[in-house]
Image (cartoon, rainbow, N blue to C red):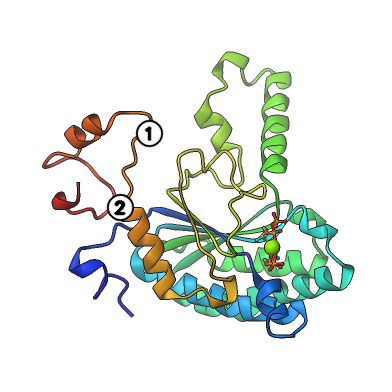
Amino acid sequence: MDINSNSNQGAELKVPRHLAVIMDGNGRWAEARGMIRVRGHQQGAEAVRRIIAAAAKAGVQILTLYAFSSENWKRPRTEVQALMKLLGRALTENAQTLNDNDIKVKIIGDVTALSGALQKSIHKLEDLTKDNQRMLLNIAINYGSRLELTRAVQQIAVKVQQGTLKPEDISEDLISRELYAPDNVDLLVRTGGEFRLSNFLLWQAAYAEIFVTDKLWPDFDEAELKRAFAFYSGRERRFGMTSAQIREQAGPGAADKTNIKPEQV
Ligand code: IPE
Ligand code: IPE
Ligand code: MG
């Protein structure tokens, strides 16, 4: 599986450094087949394995997956229980493969609200993979962006109260560093067709390109990931500047962390 082969008419696809995914549509996938929603979540776990492999192969450095939001506790008890069981199983069953593939795993969100067994699996997996270098895989469990920002503000307030930080030294970088996931998102993908963020990475996605696909998460595959990368490759990221300024900056020899080809700019 080569992510860059026979796609985009031979032109190299630009691969985002940080790819974040709202994995939505498991329930609809199951309901459309007359199955219970949990079957959709089970099938979704397969799609998770596929995207991790494809993203790592493509050279994504950070992959952040939205697995369970701080709002998802509002779902029926049986569905929440099934999701927690599935998450626990996925974390233990895939630990060895993730480690063999040099992937570092970090769970983002308030893990203290999770069961003791799940917390144990999380710590084990994070510890096992802590020195891995190829790709950072953030899995958002009991994650909410507002919760993450509130927690960051509380931590900053404590430092100010203790006198170790001056209010005027609070910068954007400092706020980012207090978040579970400090890195800016380059490409945000949402499956299931909804054009909303659902409390995911509000700060980090400030300048993310957004790709929404109608495909339901269990159907997500490498071909769809390539479509997302093709979309991303076609975007001009201006960060507030003009198009002319961007073209000037991207002249020969211009520093660019992604594998963009000069003829694409
Ligand atoms: C996403 O799929 C998985 C989670 C939120 C845990 P959904 O379960 O939200 O699927 P739909 O949106 O109901 O189809
Ligand atoms: C977002 O999906 C959360 C995850 C994918 C884990 P939801 O299905 O919970 O989002 P809403 O409720 O439709 O906004
Ligand atoms: Mg949904």
In the rendering, which numbered label is found on residue 239? 1
Residue 67 percent location from the top left of the image: 65, 63
Cα gap from disc 2 to disc 1, whole angstroms: 15 Å
SS at badge 1 = loop
Residue on which disc 2 sits: 234
Q: Is residue 135 above or below residue 173?
A: below
* Circle nearer the viewer, 2 or 1: 2
Dot 1, how many residues are within 10 Å of its Cα: few (below 14), some (14-19), or many (20+)?
few
Pick the front one: 224 or 118: 224
Residue drawn at (68%, 73%) of the image:
28
Name the secondary structure under disc 2. Answer: loop
Q: Quadrant of residue 3?
A: bottom left
Residue occupying the far right of the picture:
77
Q: Is residue 238 left or right of residue 244?
A: right
Q: Amino acid at mark 2?
A: Gly
Mark 2, Cα crowd under 10 Å, few <14 / some 14-19 / many 20+, is: few
Residue 65 picture location, percent across and down:
57, 61
> Ligand 3 lies in which image quarter?
bottom right
- State the image coordinates of residue 112 (x, y, percent, origin top left): 79, 54
